[in-house]
Image: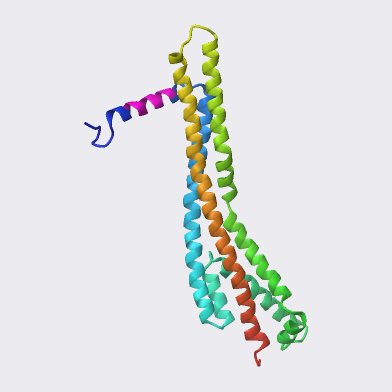
Amino acid sequence: RTIAGNIDPNEFTNLLNILELLWNAGIVVKLVLVILIACSVLSWAIIFQKRKVFNVIAEENQSFVNFFYQSTNLVEINEQAEFFKNSTVGLMFIQGFTELRKIREKLQEVGKDEGLRSYLDDHGMIALERSLKKGASTAGQSLDLRLSTLASIGSITPFIGLFGTVWGIIGSFTGLASGGGSIEAVAPGIAEALVATAIGLFAAIPAVWAFNLFNSKASEFQGQMEVFGQDFLNLIERSVLISKE
């Protein structure tokens, strides 16, 4: 027979024994367990949040890129970029288009209304390239947000759990060395100490896995932005430098 049709009575008893061990653990071990549980909760919160954000970025990037390659009207493309606020390539376009517009406005101020083509022909697209890099840098910061926290949790929590284990084992063997003890007497203390290591690994493994996954996806977005930057400059060259206007 099983409890609630799913849990074996022996497994349920073992779970209760573990919980009882943790409840009776020393203050240091309890503090370690609280820290590890808090780190695990934080890492899972970040995992779900980053997963949602990355999915939105991927969808908006795809939608914006499709429109970008279908249109040659810079103003219309900029309006679409403003609409897709989470798109990393959209942010790059906004930065590049804003810089292009500032150059045009400055030329108009100095009485060179028709000089945009000549200006770009003489000075190249260095200013536009800098603005695209600025957009890519800003987008990259949003991609990397909180990833360092996942990396920290993944690297630190095993050692925190190990500290709790070592502390618990020291306490158990200290009691054994004082005399009158037996292995049966110190076994519960050793067991509660080892649970700290297990919980440390439980907090670390998902954090490390998620960090590697999101870091890989961020690299994919970075590659997409590099390609888009070149395509943006090509579009400017076609629409401005080669135009008859």
Q: Quarter of the image containing the N terminus?
A: top left
Q: Nearer the viewer, residue 115 or 111?
A: 115
Q: Nearer the viewer, residue 72 or 228?
A: 228
16 in the magenta segment: yes
Q: Quarter of the image containing the C terminus?
A: bottom right
Q: Eyeballing the image, is 58 above or below 174? A: below
| Residue 93 seen in render | no
Q: Eyeballing the image, is 177 above or below 229? A: above
Point out the residue furthest to the left here. 1
Q: Eyeballing the image, is 36 above or below 209? A: above
90 in the magenta segment: no
Point out the residue furthest to the front here. 183
x 51%, y 12%: residue: 176
Q: Is residue 152 left or right of residue 70?
A: right
Q: Eyeballing the image, is 2 above or below 116? A: above
User: What segment is highlighted magenta in the picture?
Assistant: 13-21
x 57%, y 50%: residue: 147
x 65%, y 90%: residue: 243
| Residue 126 seen in render | yes
State the image coordinates of residue 108 (x, y, percent, origin top left): 73, 84
- Magenta segment's dominant SS is helix
* Quadrant of the rendered image containing residue 96: bottom right
x 53%, y 34%: residue: 35
State the image coordinates of residue 169 (x, y, percent, origin top left): 53, 21
